[in-house]
Amino acid sequence: MGERLSTLVIACGALAHEIVALRRLNDWPYMDIQCLPAELHNRPEKIPAAVREKIQRARGRYASIFVAYADCGTGGLLDAVLQEEDVERIPGAHCYEFFAGSAAFAELSDAEPGSFYLTDFLARHFERLVIHGLGIDRHPELMPQYFGNYRRLVYLAQVASPDRVAEARAAARRLGLAFECRITGYGELAHSLRRATEGVVRWQN
């Protein structure tokens, strides 16, 4: 398998379903996918070292390596690692930006800076990653500390699913936030992966 797979995508576990779907839809048989735990969303300082380890373990086994992370709260530390390793990533600050598209996300942020965002993955795993992951189930008094400055929850839906919308709406109620849903599809993720498979991705901070 390793001899024929020309591109390795090192991805956030929260993107695994979407990347596998895009590989199937676009017939990218020579793309391998390795995911890091989605729980790193809550510990972004650990992302750069984890990505570096994956890159170094893959050296010599693939013609190219691409990282399916945005900055994701690392404050530029992930970019520093990728520049040292000469590996590209998805442009943008976080997955919400590349799913919505940079211009649309800027409009959402300008309209209501106090917005909390969910993707399909986060809607499905809201209790595990947000409520349990942040310790709110054990310490409900933390809720206002984490979410007191938010005013609305924006669900950026990759697939139009009544079940996912219901889950996201329930999450908004749980947090006491107004609810909005935007159908984004795969956004700029599809474009970035296509360029990665063609070997023409250019560095973008």
Image (cartoon, helix red, strand yellow):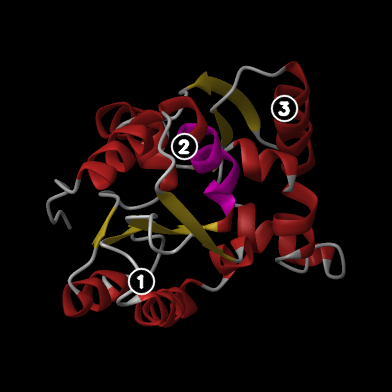
Magenta segment, which residues? 14-23
Labels 1 and 3 touching (C-beta < 8 A): no
Nearer to me, 4 or 136: 4
Classified by dominant secondary structure, the portion drawn in magenta counts as helix
Corner quadrant of residue 103:
top left
Residue 61 numbered tag:
1
Q: Nearer the viewer, mark 1 or mark 2?
A: 1
Residue on which the image places disc 2: 23
Badge 2 crowding class, 10 Å Cα cut-off, few under 14, some 14 to 19, many 20 or more, is some
Residue on which the image places disc 3: 164
Q: Residues under labels 2 and 3: Cα distance?
A: 22 Å
Q: Secondary structure at mark 2?
A: helix
Q: Residues under labels 1 and 2: Cα distance?
A: 20 Å
Q: Is residue 186 above or below residue 32?
A: above
Q: Amino acid at mark 1?
A: Arg
Rendered location of residue 179, percent (x, y) = 63, 26
- Residue drawn at x 41%, y 28% is 26
